[in-house]
Image (cartoon, helix red, strand yellow):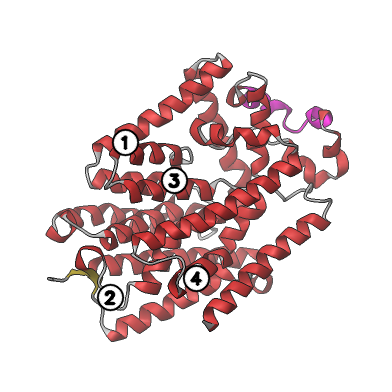
């Protein structure tokens, strides 16, 4: 109860502080609030005019640092805010963009507040999904603990402040996992929507590939294709041209925010970053083969699945392009450490089998990791060292996930 109260207070104070700060700074119309949402809102304006935003925005990129923003008088209020108005890309494929397009019917500030409310609801729903996977209830002490911890994470607060799409992608991604036993079609459609941000949804793609869920992957591809076709029909444009514009504009995203990301290639560790990237990739590639040769994994319960997906997720976070807001997909790892490392049985009688010494070591390491993931220690360490420390914590979580996967033991009833 004490821990829940501390984390709940941390979440309320931190989220409330960023909302108040954004309100006092020009009533939510400033250089940071909704920074990443603006690309979708601005692109949706083109869609409402019957124009293809991917093509229109990519073709306008030479004007990115010109006086093109003159059509928006409020953009001239300060130089910092103008950087937002000059971003001419939509950093996600058609399905998610179409879902978010109704926000463009609202004025800018109203759209950001509506999206904040949607993200907060998605946050609660995402926590419920993960609790459901590990057979816990939201309205319980365990549920309140995970909920308060999730809303305390810096990455969650960053999603709220920037208006990121990471939460909607993570929610659809894990919802596809949850509904898989009931409907391959629905699972594939949900995964197809999540794949609009492919770097974030790729771990679930890997998992379904390992489990040979070909139908799910097929429906996922069809959902992406259907979203693209709907967009092209509405705007009367060529799908190939749209794809080319999307892929080319994605490269712009990588160049624009490389200095703020937390993956290995963005950390100034020299050759060590490359070496670690290859080692982590090699370990990740070997894990599915090890699992496939184990009878336990063939009929594995959810604990095995969650651990494997967590490993894929940490690989993606470390090796592919990711900002700190994408770290929200580490929630299953947090849930496993909190609730399923103490020998309790889970679905299909799976459990982690670790010694008492390992139990305390893993909990101690994860306690330090959670501390870095929750509190703004960059105020003390400085941003450069903090980014390195944040990445070290992700590497430690990856190694912990590997150890936990190898310790999964299927009990007999």
First reached walking from the N terminus: tag 3 or tag 4: 4
Q: Residue 221: where, in percent of width, then height?
A: 36, 31
Up/down of 55 relative to 17, above or below: above
Q: Earlier in the sequence, mark 3 or mark 2?
A: 3
Report, in whole angstroms, how far the alpha carbon at label 3 lies from the one at label 4.
22 Å
Residue under label 4, please give it. Answer: 144
| Residue bearing mark 3 | 172
Picture disc at residue 185:
1
Q: Residue furthest front?
A: 139
- C-alpha distance separating marks 4 and 2: 19 Å
Q: Is residue 291 left or right of residue 33?
A: left
Q: Does the magenta stretch include residue 59?
A: yes
Instruction: Give the quadrant of the C terminus.
Output: bottom left
411 sits to left or right of 128: left
**N-terminal of the two: label 1 or label 4?**
4
Q: How far apart are marks 1 and 4 (CA)?
A: 32 Å
The residue positioned 55% from the left and 25% from the top of the image is 245
* Residue 88 seen in render: yes
Cα distance between the residues tagged 3 and 2: 28 Å
Mark 4 vs 2, N-terminal side: 4
Residue highlighted by disc 2: 344
x then y, percent, for residue 81: 78, 44
* Residue drawn at (75%, 37%) of the image: 107
Secondary structure of the residue carrying numbered label 2 = loop
Contact between labelled residues 4 and 3, with CB atoms less than 8 Å apart: no
The local secondary structure at tag 3 comes to helix
Q: Earlier in the sequence, mark 1 or mark 3?
A: 3
| Upstream in sequence: badge 2 or badge 1 | 1
Picture layout, residue 328 above or below residue 188: below
Magenta region: 56-70
């Amino acid at each position: 109860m004490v821990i829940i109260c501390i984390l709940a207070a941390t979440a309320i104070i931190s989220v409330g502080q960023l909302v108040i700060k954004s309100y006092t700074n020009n009533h939510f119309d400033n250089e940071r609030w909704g920074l990443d949402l603006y690309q979708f809102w601005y692109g949706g304006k083109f869609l409402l005019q019957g124009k293809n935003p991917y093509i229109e925005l990519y073709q306008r990129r030479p004007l990115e640092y010109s006086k093109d923003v003159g059509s928006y008088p409020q953009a001239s209020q300060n130089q910092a805010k103008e950087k937002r108005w000059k971003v001419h890309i939509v950093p996600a494929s058609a399905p998610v963009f179409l879902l978010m397009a109704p926000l463009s019917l609202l004025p800018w500030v109203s759209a950001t507040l509506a999206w904040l409310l949607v993200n907060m609801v998605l946050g609660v729903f995402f926590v419920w999904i993960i609790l459901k996977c590990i057979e816990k209830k939201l309205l319980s002490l365990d549920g309140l603990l995970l909920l308060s911890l999730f809303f305390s994470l810096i990455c969650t607060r960053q999603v709220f402040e920037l208006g990121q799409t990471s939460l909607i992608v993570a929610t659809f991604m894990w919802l596809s996992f949850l509904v898989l036993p009931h409907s391959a079609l629905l699972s594939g459609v949900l995964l197809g929507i999540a794949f609009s941000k492919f770097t974030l949804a790729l771990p679930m793609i890997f998992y379904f590939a390992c489990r040979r869920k070909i139908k799910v992957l097929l429906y996922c591809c069809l959902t992406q294709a259907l979203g693209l076709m709907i967009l092209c029909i509405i705007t009367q444009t060529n799908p190939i041209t749209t794809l080319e514009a999307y892929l080319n504009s994605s490269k712009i995203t990588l160049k624009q925010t490389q200095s703020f990301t937390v993956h290995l290639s963005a950390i100034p560790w020299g050759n060590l970053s490359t070496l670690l990237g290859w080692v982590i990739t090699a370990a990740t590639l070997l894990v599915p083969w090890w699992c496939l040769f184990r009878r336990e994994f063939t009929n594995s319960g959810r604990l095995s699945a969650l651990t494997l997906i967590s490993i894929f997720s940490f690989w993606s976070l470390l090796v592919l392009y990711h900002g700190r807001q994408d770290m929200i997909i580490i929630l299953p790892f947090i849930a496993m450490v909190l609730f399923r490392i103490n020998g309790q049985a889970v679905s299909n009688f799976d459990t982690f089998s670790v010694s008492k010494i390992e139990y305390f070591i893993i909990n101690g390491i994860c306690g330090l990791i959670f501390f870095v993931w929750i509190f703004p220690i960059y105020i003390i360490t400085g941003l450069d060292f903090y980014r390195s420390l944040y990445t070290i914590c992700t590497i430690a979580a990856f190694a912990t996930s590997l150890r936990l996967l190898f310790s999964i033991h299927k009990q007999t009833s």
